[in-house]
Structure formats: structure tokens, C-alpha cells
Image (cartoon, rainbow, N blue to C red):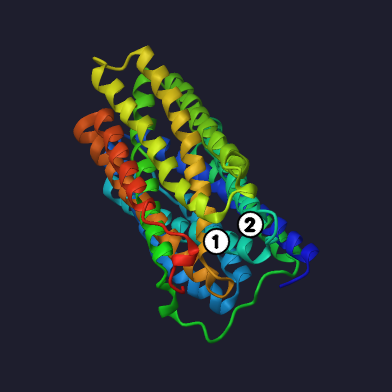
Amino acid sequence: MTSRPEGLSAYIAVTAAYWAFMLTDGALRMLVLLHFHTLGFSPVQLAYLFVLYEIAGMVTNLAAGWIAARFGLTSTLYAGLGIQVVALLALTQLDPGWAIWASVAFVMCVQGASGVAKDLAKMSSKSAVKLLAPSEGGGLFRWVAVLTGSKNAVKGVGFLLGAALLATLGFTWAVLAMAIVLAAILVAVAVLMPAGLPRGRKGAKFSEVFSKSANVNWLSAARVFLFGARDVWFVVGIPIYFYAVLSDGTEEGNRAAFFMIGTFMALWIILYGAVQASAPRILRAARRPEADLIRAARGWAAALFIVPAALTLAVWLAPGPETWLTVTLVAGLLAFGAIFAVNSSLHSYLILAFTRSERVTMDVGFYYMANAGGRLIGTLLSGLTYQIGGLALVLGTAAVMVALAALTSGRLSAQTDEAPA
């Protein structure tokens, strides 16, 4: 282990690189969603645009843990940033004259590359915390909560940035501007990165990515359902519902709707990130034994279930899009974000607590493969459920998935009962 100053400097550099990536990731998601919705894409077609992004994330996370163990964490971090720059530049080549099927196929491929980039950057950053954080006084939970919470706040700003850039610069110039800025940040981080991260080991085997730890496997299953529950309404359902309510179909109406939807999604993510960063204080983690925090995972998931269940009932009772329903949805989804943030932050701490330093990239990669799997399921269901049953089916599906997350979280056990990883 390196000395504390070197570790802290490396942590700061990793966090800055992750911030830069997530700003463009959030902006790109909002740009793609709103741009292609105005071109007439259906909810299912919009969901397809993000499918390869999530599939690529699953495959990447499974391999990235081994790649980082073999070649070092800085290699995977730089690769993530570089691939995102290439993906952004590729999107500038999109031709509005292409047929819809060609546009969908092209954007799916580019989003797939962006998914590879995101999960290389995410796995590298989260694994670095395990290796760099101080072990005493709840330092691990604090450092991972700050990294995760701050990057989600930055991603929220990215949603707002994406909507604003689309309304002011247009799709192509907005994407090009982000590519240029991210490339400059990649060069700066590569030049200024201090020592503190491991360089990799030649003997790392790919088979090591599959954990023998029951806790790692159950936590990964809970992560599938938790993030599926979030993305089932987040990716397509709620943005398209709000667009239908807010836009009158004119160019001016579209522009105003873009800003309002982008603002809501940004505020949601920023609130989510702020609560994530505060989770160690909310849970009083510094004064609680690890076994207590493990048990808390089920209770917080059960509390989260109440919100989508109540919103499903509200949508079902409403005769149509009404002002009171929209206000209820906004308030309910903000409450969902706050409770979801505590669940997510607790999971992010537990995966690092359950793993050992020598296989941290393997377990973190496997866990984030499950995370991407949940997002893939949620993305597919988001367009499908909205098209079949509208918002009520979207939110009802989210409630069922949260319930499954609570059940799988209940299978986690104290470390003393855990078999060796």
C-alpha cells in the first residue's frame, strides 16, 4: 500500500476523471433520448437505442476486472475515457437522411461503445477506492459514498447540459463540443496522474472473475433488481410522459419541454448523488458494526417498495394526465431517488467490504456486470411496459422489482459466516 498522501492524490485524480466522464455520459443520454423522440421514434425504438449500451456494459464488466488485474487500473481508466471520445465523434457522422432502421442500428453501435467506456471507467474508479481508502473510522464507506454521490450529481448536471445543448447548439455541435472537452481532460489526467494505483499482475486468470463468495453473488442479484426498478421508469417512461404533458408539438413547445424534462432529470440525479454522499451519516455507519449494515440492506429496499407501489395506485386512479398527478409523480419520484440513493450507496460499500484487495477488480467487475444486467432489463421493460400499459404498468413493474431486491438482500450474511472468496 502506498503512503496516505499518494493514495489521496490518486483518489482525487480518479474522481476528477470519473466526473468528466459522467458529465458527458449524462448529457449524451438526454441528447439521444430527446433528439430521437422528436424524430418520431416510438418508446420501444427509443429503448432499443440503449440496449447495446447495457449489453456492452455486462460484457465489459465481466472482462474489465481481469483486464485491470492483468494490466493495471490506470490502463482501464484511460481506455474508458478514450473510447467515449471516439463514440462521441462517431455520433457526429449521423445523417438525418438515413432510414429509421439504419439510424437505430448506428446509434445502437455507438451507444454500445459508450457502454464499454462507461463500465471501464466505473470499475476502475470503484476498485481504486478499495485500494486507496483508509481502513479506520469508516473511511472506506465515506470515500466510496463521496465518489459515487459526487459522480451522480455531476451526471445530473450532464442531463441538464444535454437538454440545454440540444436546444441551443443542435445535436451534432453539442456532441462535438463534448468530445473535444473530454479529450482535453483525458490528456490532462494521463499527464498528472500520481502514483498510488497497482500496475497489474501477469498471473491473473480470467476464471477468477466468477466469485465463490455467497455474499458477492447475492448482493449482485439484489443489484440487478434494484437498478432494473430504477431504469424501468427512468429511461423511457417518465421522460416521454412528461414530454406528452409539457409540449404542445411546436418547435417552441419542444424546446421548453426539453429544458423542463432535462431540469427534472438533472435535479433527480443531483438529489440522488447528494443523498448517496450523505449515506454514511444517514446510516450512522461509523458507529455501527458491519453486520448491522448488512441487515439494513433489506430494510431500506422494503422502504423503497412503498413509493412505486403508491405511485402506481395514483396513476391507476387518475382518469388521465392531470396537474395533481404530475405534481404527485414529481414528488414521489424525488422521494424514490432519496431512498434509492441510500440503497445504492449501501450496496457500493458492501461490495468493497465483501471483497479482498487482491481480487477487488474481479468482484467489482462481476458486481457491476449485474448492475448493467439490471439496467438492461429495466431499459427493455421501460419502452415495452409504457407501450403496452402506460405509466401504471411502468411503475407497477418497478414496485415488483424493488420487492425482489428486498428479498435477495435478505440473503446476505455476516462476514464470519461467509466462505472464503
Give how far across and how far down residue 245 sits, in percent.
Answer: 36, 20
Residue in the foreground of this view, choosing between 241 and 232: 232
Q: Residue at x 60, y 74 (%)?
A: 72
Q: Please count the marks in the image.
A: 2
Does residue 356 sit above or below 161 in this rendering?
A: below
Quarter of the rendering containing residue 212: bottom left
Which residue shows up at 43% across the image and 29% down it?
A: 333
Between marks 1 and 2, how big is the CA–CA gap? 8 Å
Q: Are marks 1 and 2 in contact (CB under 8 Å)?
A: yes
Frontmost residue, 139 versus 248: 139
Residue 33, x across and y down, in percent? 40, 39
The percent position of residue 276, horizontal first and vertical second, equals 56, 42
Q: Tell me the element at label 2.
A: helix
Q: Circle 1 — which element?
A: helix
Q: Return the disc, 1 or 2, that comes first in the chain's sequence.
A: 2
Tell me the number on the disc at residue 140: 2
- Amino acid under disc 2: Leu
Residue at 74% across / 71% down in the picture?
2
> Tag 2: Cα neighbours inside 10 Å, few (<14), some, or many (≥20)?
many
Q: Amino acid at mark 1?
A: Ala
Look at the picture and state if 265 lies above or below 208: above
Q: Residue at x 42, y 42 (%)?
A: 299
Residue 211 vs residue 159: left or right?
A: left
User: Could you say which is closer to the camera, residue 80 or residue 409?
Assistant: 409
Quick one: quadrant of the N terminus? bottom right
Mark 1, other Cα within 10 Å: few <14 / some 14–19 / many ≥20: some
Q: Which residue is mark 1?
A: 353
Q: Is residue 41 visible?
A: no
